[in-house]
């Protein structure tokens, strides 16, 4: 089964990486993505594209990977014990963009496919993915727009998907040790195999194809806003939360490292600069304090914009 389903998925993912990089590079207007192709010693590889010191993006990466092997890592078999003793193929596109302007939100998107096979048994496969937004100085109209784009993309397939995936995103991108959400959410799903392959594949296509339409208008609204050292320092402080999530809670980071993926490509989601400050608290009533209002999950499509 693997070749028959892998090839169309890989073709879509490679084309998606191209499309997103072209649109983000045009949006940036200054820097270009640099590409590195890499090989994984245990099987597979990928192509990593990174943009730095641009007109909009301080740093960001859009990566494609396809890795395979004869043995699943411990993190995967603990989550899915039925994968023990199976060959596996995993491919996906993942991106994180860190804008320089603190008023432009950081963004993450991922779409992926996994299949594990064993002679004499049915293959185990699933899709996963989603996108989420992490603003530092949030605007309700941006958050509402972001969620509306996600809902519209999924409603075209099944109106039951958005509320399910929105809740899943709220629960997954949550820093338990901080008791706060990483950002304002979006959509997230994993282990998607409860419908025929073509229908499941259509869901990650909907997510991937909707990303630029959801993110680029927000960037255009905020990229020219003026800011100073206060906003910059707050941005760097909040980026520390992003690092904490990726290193402590993110299953994809752990899977990549445990399967022997390319470390530089796995960790290109990290911001170029971040900071931590012991027991820092924002001034009551300040714009920095206002962020906390947005880090409690809610039904953003029922909220009125300012």
Image (cartoon, rainbow, N blue to C red):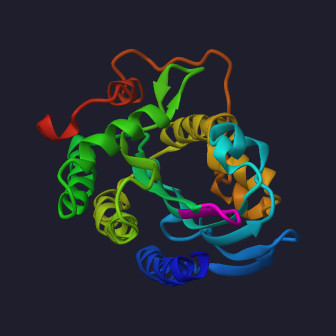
Which residue occupies 52% across, 17% down? 281
Q: Is residue 116 magenta?
A: yes
Is residue 15 positioned above or below 48 on the image? below
Task: Give the magenta range.
Answer: 113-121
Position in image of residue 204 (x %, y %): 40, 65
Looking at this view, name the residue that lies furthest to the front: 120
Q: Position of residue 25 (x, y in %)?
A: 48, 78
Let me know if residue 24 is in the magenta part: no
- In which quadrant of the rendered image does the N terminus lie? bottom right
Residue 64's x, y, as percent?
61, 72
Decide which of 83, 90 is in the foreground and name it. 83
Above or below for 295 versus 99: above
Number of marks in the image?
A: 0
Q: In what quadrant of the picture does the C terminus appear?
A: top left
Position of 142 compared to 207: left or right?
left
Position of 50 relative to 153 (above/below): below
What residue is drawn where x is 76% and y is 53%?
A: 72
Q: Residue 181 appears in which quarter of the rendering?
A: top left
Q: Visible in this render: residue 119?
A: yes
Q: Quadrant of residue 279?
A: top right
């Amino acid at each position: 089964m693997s070749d028959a389903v892998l090839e169309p998925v890989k073709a879509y993912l490679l084309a998606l990486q191209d499309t997103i990089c072209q649109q983000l590079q045009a949006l940036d207007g200054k820097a270009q993505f640099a590409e590195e192709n890499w090989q994984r010693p245990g099987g597979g590889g990928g192509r990593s594209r990174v943009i730095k010191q641009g007109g909009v993006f301080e740093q960001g990466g859009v990566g494609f990977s396809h890795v395979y092997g004869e043995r699943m890592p411990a993190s995967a078999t603990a989550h899915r014990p039925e994968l023990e003793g199976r060959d596996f193929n995993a491919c996906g596109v993942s991106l994180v963009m860190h804008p320089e302007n603190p008023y432009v939100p950081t963004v993450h998107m991922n779409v992926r496919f996994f299949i594990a096979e064993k002679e004499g048994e049915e293959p185990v496969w699933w899709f996963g993915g989603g996108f989420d937004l992490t603003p530092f100085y949030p605007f309700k109209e941006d958050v509402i727009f972001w969620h509306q784009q996600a809902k519209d993309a999924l409603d075209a397939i099944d109106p039951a998907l958005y509320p399910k995936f929105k809740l899943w995103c709220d629960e997954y991108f949550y820093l338990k040790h901080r008791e706060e959400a990483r950002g304002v959410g979006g959509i997230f799903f994993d282990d998607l195999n409860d419908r025929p392959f073509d229908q499941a594949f259509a869901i990650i296509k909907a997510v991937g194809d909707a990303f630029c339409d959801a993110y680029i208008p927000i960037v255009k609204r905020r990229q020219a806003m003026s800011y100073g050292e206060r906003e910059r320092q707050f941005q760097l402080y909040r980026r520390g939360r992003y690092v904490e999530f990726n290193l402590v809670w993110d299953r994809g980071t752990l899977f990549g490292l445990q399967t022997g993926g390319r470390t530089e490509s796995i960790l290109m989601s990290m911001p170029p600069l971040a900071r931590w400050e012991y027991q820092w608290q924002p001034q009551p009533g300040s714009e920095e304090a206002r962020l906390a209002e947005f880090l409690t999950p809610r039904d953003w499509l029922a909220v009125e914009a300012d």
